[in-house]
Amino acid sequence: HASPRPCLCGRWIPSAANIEDPLEAIGFVLLGEGAPMVVCSVDWTGLCNDAHFQWRKALADAAGTSVERVAVQCVHQHDAPFACLETDKIVRAQVDLPPNLDPEFFKVCLQRAGAAVRESLKTPRRLTHIAAAQSQVEQVASNRRILNEAGQILKNRSVAASSDDLRDLPTGVIDPWLKTVAFYDGREKVAACYYYAVHPISYCCTAGNVTSEFVGHARRLKAEHDTPGCTHIYFTGCAGNINAGKYYNSSHREKRQVLTQRIFAAMEQASEQLRPEPIKAVRWTTADFLPPVNQAFSTAELEKQINDHSRRVVHRNRPAFTLAWLRRHAEKKPITLSALHINQISLIHLPAEPFVEFQLRTQILQPERFVATAGYGDVGPWYLPTTEAYFQGGYEVSVAFSGPQADGLLMQGIQTLMQG
């Protein structure tokens, strides 16, 4: 369990007041093909820079493997912790700013995660078969970037009531497919992984009600209706520009359950199509990724914003995240991209908040393979827009800590993963 003490989403939303439902870290350790491989999904907003590395290190140490063979992806709910250790140091140096992270709670979660891995290794399950299938999710995802006739951002479509004038506009570019990959011991399903690209937000950020959101609710609902003892793991795909804004208005909170049911329905439909095949080949591939810094940001200006006591907390905490990335970049510490390949199935682990286009491109690099993509690994760079998005403008570009060169470099890294 990873449900937080007070700090939520960088501390620019209300602190945790109530645990509506628990946040969890769920994953698996794959043995028998070289050093162990670990894949984990965490119900947090994000893990940035050294915070992400420390999670991977804790799991690697517990599993007896190297950090390079560990993938940790966040689901990206917003009433949840958003952890960057360097950002927390920057913020704590400002005596009037509230801390954006509880370091002791962070350490406790690492200990819990490591203990869970060690406990699981006492009773490993045999894996003999794997299966993959997909099903369309109806009326959940929509592209939130609304362009005008000149190709510039007109407005961002959100789940807030302020977007009511945009709900009838076209869905835009999305990936409508929920992908499912399941592991078997003979005929018994042992674990099932689900991948879908949408911001997991219905209503949030107003009252400190901690929740795993509609995707977490769907995950638990699926567990209740599936093979007893099967572990169910949900991954958010490349959802940087995708939310539920066309189909959901946060003023109608009871409709969160509608989104839950739509995700659950796709999980059920995909599961019905699963056809297990013997596991014949397993590979783990990695690639380094360190895109140039967005030239819109400078250390001097960021420090000025952080030191400006007249600014709101959000407008001082967010620059602290940016400054943390600039410092990391100056140290030339790359992000590790990784992929798990089993037979003709590839599970891709990407960083930050990538636009859905990266997911769609990845799927056509090797059309003969079944590709499932998880975003929100190391969220240090925040958003990863496409090159053209930088010229369109919009919120996502304003908080993309890397420049437009990130597009080509990320695709190079993905190609290395697929070919390695």
Image (cartoon, rainbow, N blue to C red):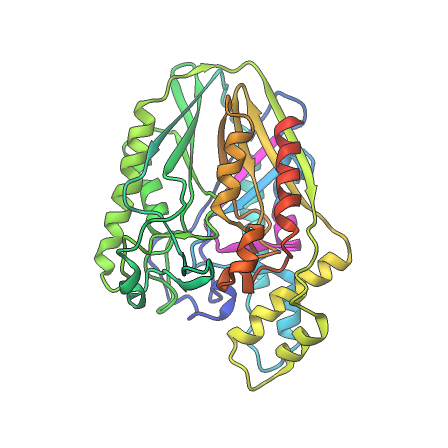
Q: Say whether residue 50 is magenta.
A: yes
Q: Residue 57's x, y, as percent?
A: 66, 44
Residue at 62 percent across and 24 percent down: it is: 283
Q: Residue 355's x, y, as percent?
A: 50, 49
Q: Residue 259's x, y, as percent?
A: 28, 48
Residue at 65 percent across and 67 percent down: it is: 296
Which residue is at the far front? Answer: 150
Of residues 131 and 101, the one nearer the viewer is: 131
- Is residue 54 visible from the viewing direction of this image? no
Q: Could you tell whether 162 is left or right of 181 in the image?
A: left
Q: Residue 166's x, y, as percent?
A: 30, 60
Q: Quadrant of the C terminus?
A: top right
Reply above or below: 222 against 172: above
Residue 62, located in which quarter of the rendered image? top right
Reply above or below: 300 against 396: below
Of residues 323 and 127, the one nearer the viewer is: 323
Residue 165, located in which quarter of the rendered image? bottom left
Residue at 54 percent across and 75 percent down: it is: 315
Q: Say whether residue 47 is magenta.
A: yes
Reply above or below: 297 against 124: below
Q: Which residues are magenta?
A: 37-55
Residue at 46 percent across and 58 percent down: it is: 151
Which residue is at the far right? Answer: 331
